Image (cartoon, coloured by chain):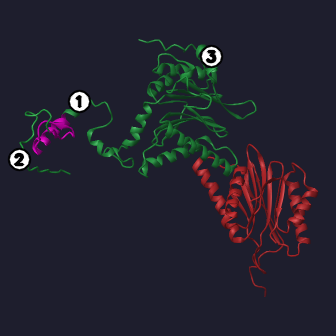
Amino acid sequence: AETLQIVVSSSPVPSHANDKESYLWRSHTGGFGTTLESRGSCKRNQGIENQKKSERKVSSAVSNMSRRYDSRTTIFSPEGRLYQVEYAMEAIGNAGSAIGILAKDGVVLIGEKKVTSKLLQTSTSAEKMYKIDDHVACAVAGIMSDANILINTARVQAQRYTFMYQEPMPVEQLVQSLCDTKQGYTQFGGLRPFGVSFLFAGWDKNHGFQLYMSDPSGNYGGWKAAAVGANNQAAQSILKQDYKDDASREEVVELALKVLSKTMDSTSLTSEKLELAEVFLTPSGSVQYHVHSPESLTKLLVKHGVTQPAAETS
Amino acid sequence: MECVFGLVGKGFAIVAADTSAVHSILLHKNNEDKIMLLDSHKLVAASGEPGDRVQFTEYVQKNVSLYKFRNGIPLTTAAAANFTRGELATALRKNPYSVNILMAGYDEESGASLYYIDYIATLHKVDKGAFGYGSYFSLSTMDRHYREDMSVEEAIELVDKCILEIRSRLVVAPPNFVIKIVDKDGARDYAWRQSVQDVTTAAV
């Protein structure tokens, strides 16, 4: 809507020329300028700027028009995109990375901790890895508070299934159920999507060891190796080259550490910046979720020679 | 007066049920099949209020099918039995179903199994079980003659002994029975034991 404001006064029209601190006029860009723009000049300027914008290389995914479709999560843009979902994924792209890799005898999850401080009580707070049920664990990338809600939801869903059927919930069904919840936030309710991506690692009697990745849109897929969070594309391409089927858990841990050391921004890898967890079967046949202690992690880092950052390759 | 009983043999489970549909003193029909195929490898023999019996068993059957369609894998017998018991338990303190169920199934990992589920949501995994007035006779007979890992022939012999006992000792004994079996090849009809058949033409 356009408003017209009429001022009747005897004082001269304020202008930047006669008084530096005088009134500034709102311009078509929404900012302030020194001259009052007429409707004609306004439209002309807007046209020139739009032209300039389309010539300029646009690095972000968003054009000026999309500002109108940003605010509501539950509507499409004219190009058929859900901007809030995409923005949620952007948020995750700035969070600490997490990588999951399938081994022949287990699944390995590794995460980069962004909150590192001597004062942090590591025994009681986990940042990246969480146990959902006895046979399923997950790694998280994104907004921690959002993740906590979803982790609780997943835990409740798993227990509800076990209450009904007296057996552990198949991993894919758990992931699907959680993703159905996430999808709801992209279609109705007017609430923003969750800014979290998950890597689910688990075992069930139908499909053995499995790794699933899910994102804020509610999409999920089963993967042999996957990465979420910062630099996930770089990590994913390294994984594509170096992943081998039927590797042992030890080999997979080595691969995970190597990939993370190459993609992490920090100058050196220490055990306090990492969380490493494995899901495997004990000899008696029960599923075990084991988070490595800092000492064990340090030993592994030294063993695989990744305490220093990866050497620059030409 | 409804009689339902069953037992587990070597790699199979057998259930037998009477086939009378009764309303007060009237016998509607004597070929009512009270043993439903829950899925390819599960049988549910049910007794109780006729309306509840059909409604509840069909509800369980459809939910078991839905699970298979949604998840690509069938429920195990144990999971299906626990689900059934859960539904009875949930309804119990609001509007209970008056249905007693013997659920028999075959799973590749755990073999043949039989579950006793009564109308107040009791669940027991059993080798032999029975409901109704007939249970006084069939349970005693099965206790006397049952052994582990019986063959199909031996099990059918025992089932026939039970039917004979019911027919000779229960005051309003049902005339006809249906016997069904489930094993690795699936759930299917085994035999009918009929002493009275519906008369199709009027007597002259």
Span of residues in magenta: A23-51
Residue B93 on image: x %, y %:
69, 64
Considering the image in quadrants, where does the N terminus of chain B appear?
bottom right
- Asked if A194 appears above or below B85 in the picture, the reply is above
1 or 3: mark nearer the eye: 3
Dividing the image into 4 quarters, which one contains the C terminus of chain B? Answer: bottom right
Q: Residue at x 88, y 75 (%)?
A: B171
- Amino acid type at circle 2 is Ser
Parent chain of label 3? A
Task: Identify the mark at residue A10; answer none if there is no mark.
Answer: 2
Give the answer, above or below, for where A20 lies relative to B108. Answer: above
What residue does disc 3 label?
Answer: A299
Q: Earlier in the sequence, mark 1 or mark 3?
A: 1
Residue at the disc numbered 1: A56
Q: Nearer the viewer, residue A289 or A212?
A: A289
Per the image, is A31 magenta?
yes
- Colour applied to chain B: red
